[in-house]
Amino acid sequence: MADTLMSIQIIPKTPNGEDVIPYVDAAIAVIDASGLPYYVSPLETTIEGNMSELLPLIEKMNKEMMKRGVTSVISQVKFYHAEHASMDKLTHKYR
């Protein structure tokens, strides 16, 4: 069972000032490849898993950005850590 929710916003500085959306899409593809449950919202993506699974995703996303030629990337990250962390558990009353 998951013990952590991680929300992340990737803000890449693109090589030629182009739109960041294709880069953000590439970061979300890294999350998708992890097989972990996630939810994309307008300003950040939340992933459900264990801390040991989530921390390496930050590095993988940043490496993917650099591989794509960004000059820098900011990763804004938030964690919720509990014995049984669940996106559904925290948001069910709003759905």
Image (cartoon, rainbow, N blue to C red):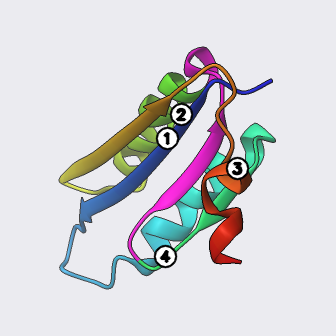
Q: Residue at x 52, y 74 (%)?
A: 41
Q: Which residue is mark 2?
A: 57
Nearer the observer: mark 4 or 1; the answer is 1
Mark 4 in CB contact with mark 3 (< 8 angstroms): no
Mark number for residue 89? Answer: 3
Question: How packed is label 3: few (under 14 Cα within 10 Å), some, or many (20 or more)?
Answer: few
Nearer the observer: mark 2 or 1; the answer is 1
Nearer the observer: mark 1 or 3; the answer is 3
Residue 94: percent from the left, percent from the top?
A: 63, 75
- Residue furthest out toward the bottom: 19
Mark 3 in CB contact with mark 2 (< 8 angstroms): no
Mark 2 in CB contact with mark 1 (< 8 angstroms): yes
Pointer 2 or 1: first along the chain: 1
Q: Which is more toward the observer, 61 or 42?
A: 42
Whole-number angstrom distance, CA of label 4 to CA of label 1: 22 Å
Q: Amino acid at mark 2?
A: Leu
Q: Which residue is mark 4?
A: 22
Residue 79 drawn above or below residue 46:
above
* Res 43 → quadrant: bottom left
Pointer 3 or 2: first along the chain: 2
Residue 1: percent from the left, percent from the top?
A: 80, 23
Q: Which residue is mark 1?
A: 6
In the image, the segment drawn in magenta is 43-53
